[in-house]
Image (cartoon, rainbow, N blue to C red):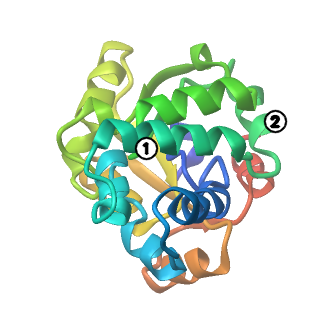
Amino acid sequence: MNFSEIKAIVFDYDDTIVQTKEIRSITLKRLAKEEYHFTLSDLEIQNAWGLPGEEFLLKIYGDYAKDVASLWEKYNNYCSQDKNLPYPGAEEFINGLTDKYPLGILTSSSQIRVFKEIDLLGFPKDRFFTIQTSDDTSVHKPDPNVFSPLLEKAKEMGIPREKIIYIGDSLHDQTSSKGAGLEFLGMAHEPSAAEKFSQKNIPFVTSFRELGNLFP
């Protein structure tokens, strides 16, 4: 991969830019215990992780909550009490590149959560040429077609898909982005992610500091 030829950088959001799984595991368990009176296990969270927003919540709470609107309201209220956190170096890296590269986000999370968090985390939305959430497509990762809206915007900007790199933490991120014709770089904040990428011979970094060495 020749990083000097990259013309745009697109990020996954959860567990790539922000520490969602660690923070939201606390939120999800509190919501389960306090509102629906059951104990939520790490395995149940893991089995649902990565699903689009509404599907994710129903996978976990569907046996206890039949009103989706009420479930969303409760979940968002609980999320507001547990502020998501960017990984070390994320703010500096992203804010330092906004004048050098068009930047984007493509995530399986819901628009209401991502937009609210980005405003609080020091990533102004106008720094990104697109912030695509699960609300914007009927297909989701690992389906490569999830990138279609983003690629349309890139085409309007004169950026070919092969000059775009997608940075994400999962194999689904790699499968969908490569299938759509983009370059991919893994972000392995956890040893388990590094092991998965290594087993598949997928290039990866383990921090935004390492990433900064590739895009000085």
Q: How many neighbours does mark 2 have within 10 angstroms: few (below 14), some (14-19), or many (20 or more)?
A: some
Q: Are marks 2 and 1 in contact (CB under 8 Å)?
A: no
Q: Is mark 2 on a helix, strand or loop?
A: helix
Nearer-the-camera pick, 64 or 127: 64
Q: Name the residue under label 1.
A: 109
Residue 161 x/y as whole percent: 33, 36
Q: Name the residue under label 2.
A: 92
Q: In which quarter of the image is residue 156?
A: top left
- Count how many numbered circles sit on residues in the image: 2
Residue 150 x/y as whole percent: 33, 29
- At x 43%, y 64%, the residue is 49
Q: Is residue 33 above or below residue 216?
A: below
- At x 67%, y 55%, the residue is 19
Is residue 85 visible in the rendered structure shown here? yes
Q: How many neighbours does mark 1 have within 10 angstroms: few (below 14), some (14-19), or many (20 or more)?
A: many
The image's mark for residue 34 is none
- At x 40%, y 57%, the residue is 173
Is residue 104 visible in the rendered structure shown here? no
- At x 37%, y 47%, the residue is 53
Q: Quadrant of residue 155?
A: top left
Q: What residue type is labelled 1?
A: Ser
